[in-house]
Image (cartoon, rainbow, N blue to C red):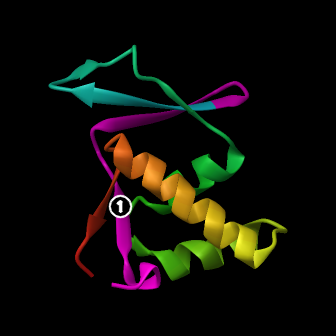
Amino acid sequence: MDNQDLHFVRNPDFIFRKIVEETILVPVYQDVADMDAIYSLNELGAFIWECLATPLEMSKLEGNILDAFDADPSKVSEDLIHFLDEMEAIGAVTRVEA
């Protein structure tokens, strides 16, 4: 399957909070936060996380990023794949059927 056809959605078991200048993700298992596994997101990571409130395909995510940020399209694609791979590895996002 082509990466552009993949849909991703965030895991509802992760709490997303903006605290002062920092944005964090905290996994919650059985209503208990895992404070040893707090992930800090930069501005772009937080933007992507917010976009993934509903399943979204890779091409739409790239378009949203390019609309919101002044960035090189090839770099956006590369960075987005890397970010989603990392988020998928920790269970923060999952691939879903279109």
Q: Residue 74: image x %, image y %?
A: 72, 76
Label 1 is placed on what type of residue?
A: Val
Q: Which residues are magenta?
A: 1-22
Residue 22 picture location, percent across and down: 67, 29
Q: Quadrant of residue 61?
A: bottom right
Q: On the rendered structure, is 53 left or right of 22?
A: left
Q: Nearer the viewer, residue 33 or 82?
A: 82
Residue plotted at (47% across, 57% down): 84
**Is 58 in the magenta?**
no
Quick check: 75 left or right of 41?
right
Residue in view at x 20 percent, y 27 percent: 29
The residue at which mark 1 appears reads as: 9
> In what quadrant of the picture does the C terminus appear?
bottom left
Assess whether residue 11 is covered by the magenta stretch.
Answer: yes
Tell me if mark 1 has few (under 14), some (14-19) or many (20+) residues whose alpha carbon lies within 10 angstroms of its own.
Answer: many
Above or below, comparing residue 43 to residue 69 in the picture: above
In the displayed image of the protein, which residue is found farthest to the top? Answer: 36
In the rendered image, the vertical position of residue 21 relative to residue 1, given as above or below: above
Q: Quadrant of residue 42?
A: top right
Q: Residue at x 35, y 37 (%)?
A: 14
Residue at the extreme right: 70
- Which quadrant does the N terminus fall into? bottom left
Is 47 left or right of 33, judged from the image as shown? right
Q: Is residue 55 visible?
A: no
